[in-house]
Amino acid sequence: MGCPLGNPWRNELTISGPVHTSRIWKGSPYPLGATYRDNGVNFALFSEHASSVELCLFEQADDSEPSRKVKMREWDDHVWHVFLPDAKPGQLYGYRVGGPYAPEDGHRFNPAKLLIDPYAKAISGHIKWGEEMFGYTIGHPDGDLSRDERDSAGAMPKSVVIDPAFDWQGDRPPGTPLAESVIYELHVKGFSKRLEAVPEKLRGTYAGLASPPSIEYLKKLGVTAVELLPVHQHVDSKHLLDKNLSDYWGHNTIGFFAPEAGYSSSNDGGGQVREFKEMVKRLHAEGLEVILDVVFNHTVEGNQFGPTLSFRGVDNSSYYRLVAENKRYYFDYTGTGNTFNIPHPRVLQLLMDSLRYWVLEMHVDGFRFDLAATLARELHAVSRLSAFFDVIHQDPIISQVKLIAEPWDVGDGGYQVGNFPVLWAEWNGRYRDVVRRYWKGDSGVTSDFAYRLCGSADLYEATGKKPMASINFVTSHDGFVLRDLVSYTDKRNQANGEDNKDGDNNNNNWNCGHEGPDAPDEVRALRRRMMRNFLATLLLSQGVPMIRGGDEFGGTQEGNNNAYCQDNEISWLDWNWDDEARQLFHFSRQLVQLRKRHPIFRQPKFFQGRVLRGADIKDLTWINASGEEMSDEEWQAQFAKVIGLMLGGDSLSVTDVYGERIRDDTYLLFFNAHHEDVVIHLPGEEEVSWRVVFDTARDESFPAEPVGASLPPMMPSAEGNPGGTEQTLTGRSLVLYQKASGSDEGARRRHKGARKAAGPGTAGAKESPAAPAVTAQPSGQAPGGSRPEGSSQNRS
């Protein structure tokens, strides 16, 4: 083993360079990467199959010749290491790794190619694309079996030694319970790039996101956490740059420890690290958590025809999953050409070291794992017993932060919604699809829609999870934004340069009767109503809501449902609001405040849907248009025009920190996905009355917000409507009522004088003609805390 860092025992090796020589120490194989100590820097690089490693030191990021070269002679536990007593933070470096170039055996070593340290904490400079960036000779008859001898150093970014010191000033994570979270997905650059209140130099940067105007906006909206699209250092692929495009989403990762320098207003020689930390500190001070979207499933190096930038040249057969029969080729569960080899112990170590680094050193509060099913593949199948889960679950640091899976990949058996183990929350793709289909007017989704409203117990309860396992979303960075979801039937991705062939064709979207933004007034009114329907459904569902940044005010991407390469006004949020945008933001803000103020909308346990504690108290009751409890026949209907959901405040299964039960108001939600108005009867006996909290049919759904108010008003002053009162639900609308008087027991009883409704909400009701019919999926009982018999656990 090598000596500990700083140990005076050392051997006399030399650094050779143009004009410089110096003594060096043996160093240590741990920790991996470049680690600064008061007396120098330790460099350690894992490569099991290399025959030589040379450390190259540079003065500038675009230098083609190193100022020093160090032959790394110490090799312990497959780690090459050396300690340089005179090295300091800011030092630029890279590696040249020698070994066999035998693609059929999985090895692609090429010392002509300068490599980024897989553990680099910062990366300086940009790739200058040319043929020398590839380990093989482009155009050679042998293809990738040939070897290119041209030096790539002048065209490569350089790794940076950083100083980890930072004054956190007592920073503490907000520690918001997941059940109480409201997540806001945003892009660091796209959020503030057009926000004029932010100083111009800071727009589109970490500092811009942490600026007072940005934080003021996030706090006014009321979200509790920002989920940042990937901030690991990434590379813009050559084929995108050739089309004047870029990897805007940042999924082409090259550094799992380095914050993306392009989002920094500081220098890229370590300034990006300090700026990121300052951003986290400021967001924490305002009670906002930071969740990172991390892409560990693949890298930018692609398949056998990709460039040699880091992992491929360091140890290709260790870092990537290769086809056993011919290791020249890569398994591709990600659709990007390669798959990171998570089952390998050293690769799994890298993943865990990265996660711990971002928690311990950068103070982030959680992670959303892109294509997480790929990370759980052992041989080929996705396994709940994989080493990936085992290591995370036993880790005392990572197991305590928020862990969110995108529970699918593009390989066979990759759709795993509902199958991740405890500790994990999931992006609930079932929620997104069913909620879209319900409001579009599809048949056969009533029961499924009800399950999504109640936290998706059919997906999570049997495995010991709770409603917060479901990260509910209607839109995300990937797909249509909310306004476009209700404005376009066809995607408009021509700007991506792929003849509109990219992007998903199955979006469950509907243009409300007119294609594109230039629509008649009545269509625009319907679209505003539909956006309110989606937002209200999202914020009032059990589980954890995630709002895509910009949807709260109706931003648009002009119909582009795959804007991964659009680093421009298509993707950047537009803060020049018209009256419609201001109105929708007010509605969104009110919804967030309503959810935060009333625990009945964010319960930590699943509903039981039955009489509780021996009394006539139920935590939820499903109501039909007649004001009565829905029957099994109505649940089996192809299309129910109206469904109502009563949440009993007296039955709330929530306690405070002292174990005392918390009570809340009783609420009644009525959903009308039919294209026509429908008459309903409010449930309850004579002493029961209901008042409207909001009606999505109205543009001014909530009371107007007083000027200077710190919190918006929640309730109108009206006394309400007695049980049995007829109400008209506008076509495609949602109404929320609060019980103003009477008991919960009385609220569940049908008013004696109420006239039984004829048709709405009953089996056989005519479906909406505005959307194609979808075959019904049978369910056997009213959704509550248990999955109906015969329903699928994994319907996509």
Image (tube, rainbow, N blue to C red):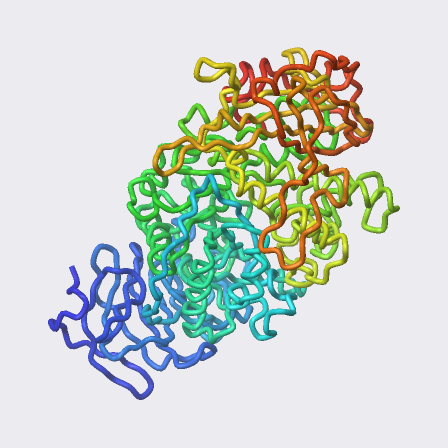
- Image point (85%, 51%), residue name: 518
Which residue in the rendered view is the most extreme toward the bottom? Answer: 19
Report x, y in % for residue 201: 57, 75
- Image point (67%, 50%), residue name: 586
Image mark count: 0
Report x, y in % for residue 529: 75, 40
Left or right of 653, for residue 208: right
Q: Is residue 110 among the parts visible in the rendering?
A: yes
Report x, y in % for residue 693: 67, 37
Please tell me whether residue 92 is drawn above or below residue 682 in the rendered image. Answer: below
Residue 648, by quadrant, is top right
Q: Nearer the viewer, residue 448 or 356?
A: 448
Report x, y in % for residue 792: 55, 21
- Image point (64%, 12%), residue name: 631
Left or right of 106, for residue 788: right
Residue 572, by quadrant, is bottom right
Q: Dividing the image into 4 quarters, which one contains the C terminus?
A: top right
Please tell me whether residue 496 is drawn above or below residue 274 in the rendered image. Answer: above
